[in-house]
Every structure is written in C-alpha cells, then in structure tokens.
Amino acid sequence: MAQRTKVMQVIARMNVGGPAVIVAELMRGLDKTQFEQILITGYCDDTEADYLDEVATDIKATRIAGLGRSVSPLADLKAFVGLVKTIREFKPDVIHTHTAKAGVLGRITSIIAGRGAVRIHTFHGHLLHGYFAGWKTQLVVSIEKFLAGKTDQLIAIGNEVKKDLIAAGIGNEEKFSVFFPGLPEPASYSKELIRRELELDPTTIYCTFVGRLTQIKRPDRLLDIAEKMAEEKVDIHFLVAGEGELFESSKRRAAAQNLPITFLGWRKDIAQLFAASDIAILTSDNEGIPLTLIQAAQAGLPILAPSVGSIADIVKNEKTGLLTPPLATPMAKALVTLFNDPALRNSMGAAGKAHAHEFFSLERMLRDHTGIYNSAHNK
C-alpha cells in the first residue's frame, strides 16, 4: 500500500466558530487511506466554548500551551518550543496552518523544524479591518507579507478575502486558491414541531443571530436594530445564540430597554434554531465567510447582513437575502422589508438553499483539500 501523506493541522484554538468547524470536518472527512492527520491546537479563553469539548468530541487533538488567543512573549515561546518538538516527532509532509497566531508560529516553526514539509495557510478572514489601530495593522501586514513568501500555497475562504489580501501585498494570484467552506447537509425539521420543542410562539416572526458576542461581531448594532423595531412597533423577536465578552453587557442593555430579544447562550442545536426561524441576521464589521450564514442558507432562510468581507459569496443581494452598509438604520429598514413580505422571504430562502447546496457542500470542500494536499506533496 502507498505511504499515506502526513498532514499536520495547526490552529490556535478550537473555539466554537467557523475555523473550528472547517478543521473538524477536514479531520473527519479526508480519506484515511490517503492521509494520516494530526490536529495541533491550544486552549480556549474562559469566555469561549471549546468546539472539541462541546460538539466534536470524536476528534482527538494535541494541545500545546500558549498557542491560544492571547499574545504574550512567555506563552508564545512555550508554544514555539511545543510546535518544534511536535513537528520533529510527527515529521509531516504537509503543515496546514489556520488563523492568524497559529499561522505565524506554525509557519516559522515549520521553517526551522519542518524538514521540507509543504506549508499551506488558510485565511479564514483577515485582520486588516476592524481589529487593530493603524500601526498594529501595518505590523500584521508586514509579518504576513514575509510569511506569504515562505508559504507554498495560500487559501482564502472567500473571494473578497483573497482580493483584500492581495491588495495589501500579501501573496499573489499564482499562490492563492479560494476554497469555500463546506458543511454537511442538515436534517429536515418540521418548523411547527421544532417551535413546540423550543417553546417558541407559533405565530411570531423570529430573526436569529448566531455568533460570538465580541466587538467585531457588533452585538450593539443588533441591539440598535431591535430598538428601532420596538420603536416602530414591528412585531419581530430576536433570538441570539452565542456568548463572549459582550454577552452580559448585551443582556443588561436588552433588559433595561425591554428589547424583544432572547439570549440563548452557546447552543449545539443551531440547525434546529434556524429551522424554527424566519430570518437570519449578522451585524459584523468584518467577516471571512461566516459558517452560520451557510447554515442559515441551508435551512432555507433569507439572510440580512452587512456587505463586508466575503459575505457576498453567500448572500446574493436581492436574490438570497439583503446586503446593506454595516449600519443600524439601513439594516433595520431592510429587516422591515423582509418582515412585511412573506413571499419574498420564501423565494429568497429557496434560492439561498440551492446556492448553498451548489457551492458550500462538504464534498466540494474535501475534494478541494485532497487536491491541494496531493499536488503540493507530489511537487
């Protein structure tokens, strides 16, 4: 039997979110007769749910202290040493890094200890907008430019992500591929039955937000939209699934203003939540391709989102949903349009479901990665 290609997946932390889901599906789905994989990751913050503990309990990982979200010289040094040791022990053919910190540490350690391993890095988004002040952003760009030159293949999860990175001088057309995330097809659910199980009102229009309650996701903007709905007496209710550092403050504001929002915390039943909903919403300042919107499209929901990052790869404006500037007023106006037009919601939801089936299937994502691993290793 031919020797299997050894692939090391490196991600800073497997917090509940898109990158963790993608990495987990790669670990599960790639042909085990072709690939021997190992997952290297750090630990989640106290305010985050760990996807490996909460959902992907079937996936084993090697944890390296210091590889998590926080940046500190001592922690980063520990992670650096741990990565070098692990690379030398596993002797991978391919080192595939995900997320910013793991991309930096993973690629630097692979240069030192990789012994000819092919380096691949996936940008699940980028840090060019909405994260840091000017000089910090320039530092990030400088580091990424340097590392792009040392990376064999770069992957962007969306077209706009790739475009932004190339415009910033990070990589070039020849080195980049765009691989859309892929998700398994969800089970079919009865909306009426799921609403009963979740104790939701059978006649209310529900608008559902799924994501971490962190600054980049702008939960304050969601609350502003809810406030406008209440002021205009639009009888819509918001469901919020997720936690984060702004979870408690968001709940306090919603309670103080008596906003029509139910905070559900971290949930494992996202497919059921979307099946029980009428509209999906996201309010971020920056995104790669948010997997929650793919899940919403798979559930046949119209989507309201800001036109940022690569969201336009999922949401085709006025066909599968509505894209607006990342501001509360135009988003609220668009939400009223969806609220008032059930036929529009249904037609957009059906178009979105077909689009998701064509472009965001798990089979397509696994096929893309199998191809790049094989071609890179066989060069």
Image (spheres, rainbow, N blue to C red):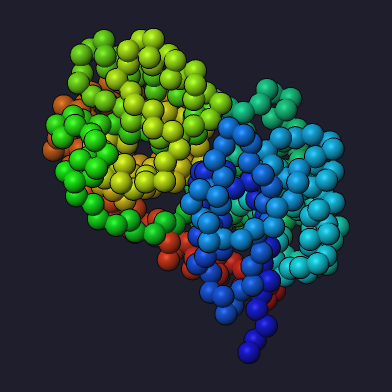
Q: Nearer the viewer, residue 320 or 73?
A: 73
Q: Position of residue 294 (x, y in %)?
A: 38, 47
The residue shown at (63%, 89%) is: 1
How many labels, in total?
0
Work out whether residue 269 can be spotted: yes
Give the position of the C terminus as an image quadrant: bottom right
Q: Position of residue 93 (x, y in %)?
A: 72, 70
The residue shown at (33%, 30%) is: 239
Residue 342 in which image quadrant: top left
Q: Position of residue 159 (x, y in %)?
A: 49, 47
Q: Position of residue 8 (x, y in %)?
A: 68, 63
133 relative position to 282: left or right: right
Above or below, comparing residue 152 to residue 377 in the picture: above
Residue 219 in which image quadrant: top left
Q: Nearer the viewer, residue 263 or 304?
A: 263
32 relative position to 109: left or right: left
145 relative position to 58: left or right: right
